[in-house]
Amino acid sequence: MKTITPFIFALLLITSCTQQASIDTTAELTEAAAVDAGVSEERLMRIDAMLTEAIAQNQIPGAVALVARNGKIVYYKAFGMADNEANRSLQRDDIFRIASQTKAITSTAVMMLWEEGKFSLDDPISKFIPEFENAVIFESLNEADSSFTGTPASKPISIRHLLTHTSGIGYGMIDDDNFRKIYQKAGIIDAFTTEDVSIEENIKKLALLPLHHEPGAKFTYSEGLDVLGYLIEIVSRKPLDQFFKERIFDPLGMEDSYFYLPESKKDRLVTVQTKKDRAWARYPDNPYFDADYPIKGAMSFFSGGGGLSSTAKDYACFLQMYLNNGEYNGVRLLSRTTVQTIMSNQVGDLLGESGSYYGLAFGVLDENGAGMGGRSSVGTFEWGGYFNTQYFADPVENVIGILMKQTQDTWSDETGWKFRLLVGQAIDD
């Protein structure tokens, strides 16, 4: 047997942990005339009218909308204001807090490491984070001190459970009263903070708290992707922000995607706004989070479930990689076979008759959902973010739609479903 020299071993290690050039090579996303991508320019103008009217009706203060088809950006515009109080108009390359849109990026990172054989999707998470070893199912809350009782779980939480929101872990501030109180007492950070906290500290505390139900029994939207953010750090031996930059953002050309913005880009961050006396005003600080988390504070907490900020163009590049079956601009992040696994139904009928199921990174439209109309084709993958951002990507029509806003506590916004409908009706080939 030949001996592997230290140099060759190091080279093998490096090449196993970096993106590889792909045999299949697609181009970068660039702007093109709508007609060249089989889209009607005239019908796209209905998006202009819809968003302009929504701003006039005070549904939203502003929005950036992007439509891509067949690898070409055919619509990319900004409307309204980034900050009404500061009288700053929205620009199409402005940066938005994308919150739960972070989840698909974290899931992608997990699947990249899975492809390298670092773990099985059905490995218990306690294999890597021992604090999850003795998980319990919630039974009751003592209102006097927010302590709880629980019974031991009959099965361990797996990595697959965490990817699919079936682990039973809760979600603090957006959860029910019992879990809000339990998480608050434990000092759990749900998604973002300006405090000096690490995801390691947060997840080790979270592991000691009760579950909603037995792992795999139900779909419960959860902080499981934050747990997986910590898993990525453990397995890759890199901080999550560094892993994202080196393995996803740089290869995809996502130059404006960060957990915390550099000084040179802070003035491009869109203000989170809410209605105050019928006018748009900066969303005030509150007990749960500081909306300025990406530009101030300790900048030490990397939430895999909700901490990123990005642009419409950057996120379109990420979605295009998936439409390309894991490849973008000559670099392969995921195998086509892995993308197929990610898009398959991983939760059975746990979502009921919603018209969609959940895979390993996205909600995915099924035949019933597509048949309802206005929601795109079977297999369309989608999600959104807490600060009112939405996206979808249709693999049948090779279409991406991204609508970025930054609002809270607004209930009259109809732009999300209307935008999606108007993207579909503009297809003209």
Image (cartoon, rainbow, N blue to C red):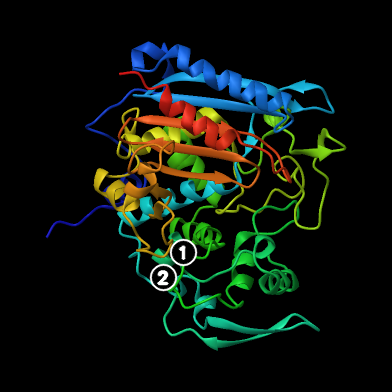
Q: Can the viewer see residue 10?
A: no
Find residue 386 and report its horizontal and vertical position in percent: 63, 47
The image shows residue 320, relative to residue 426, as above or below, that is below
Of the residues shown, which amino acid type is indicated by label 1? Leu
Query: What residue lies at 61% left-to-right and 60% top-to-bottom?
Result: 199
Q: Which image quadrant: the N terminus? A: bottom left
Crowd band around label 1 with a 10 angstrom C-alpha radius: few (<14), some (14–19), many (20+): many
Crowd band around label 2 with a 10 angstrom C-alpha radius: few (<14), some (14–19), many (20+): many
The image shows residue 360, relative to residue 41, as above or below, that is below
Residue 125 as seen in the image, left or right of residue 283: left
| SS state under label 2 | loop
Find residue 64 and report its horizontal and vertical position in percent: 60, 26
Query: What residue lies at 52% left-to-right and 83% top-to-bottom?
Result: 134
Q: Quadrant of residue 110?
A: bottom left
| SS state under label 1 | helix
Callouts 1 and 2 close, C-beta under 8 Å: yes
Farthest-out residue, front:
372
Q: Which image quadrant: the C terminus? A: top left
> Residue at label 1?
162
Q: In which quarter of the image is residue 399?
A: top left
Query: What residue lies at 67% left-to-right and 27% top-to-bottom?
Result: 54
Q: Quadrant of residue 172?
A: bottom right
The image shows residue 339, relative to residue 130, as above or below, that is above
Farthest-out residue, right:
277
Residue 400 as seen in the image, left or right of residue 194: left
Mark identifier at residue 158 = 2
Of the residues shown, which amino acid type is indicated by label 2? Ser
Find residue 91 and report its horizontal and vertical position in percent: 65, 21
Q: In front here: 398 or 314?
A: 398
- Between the C-alphas of marks 1 and 2, the distance is 7 Å
Find residue 85 and report its horizontal and vertical position in percent: 84, 28
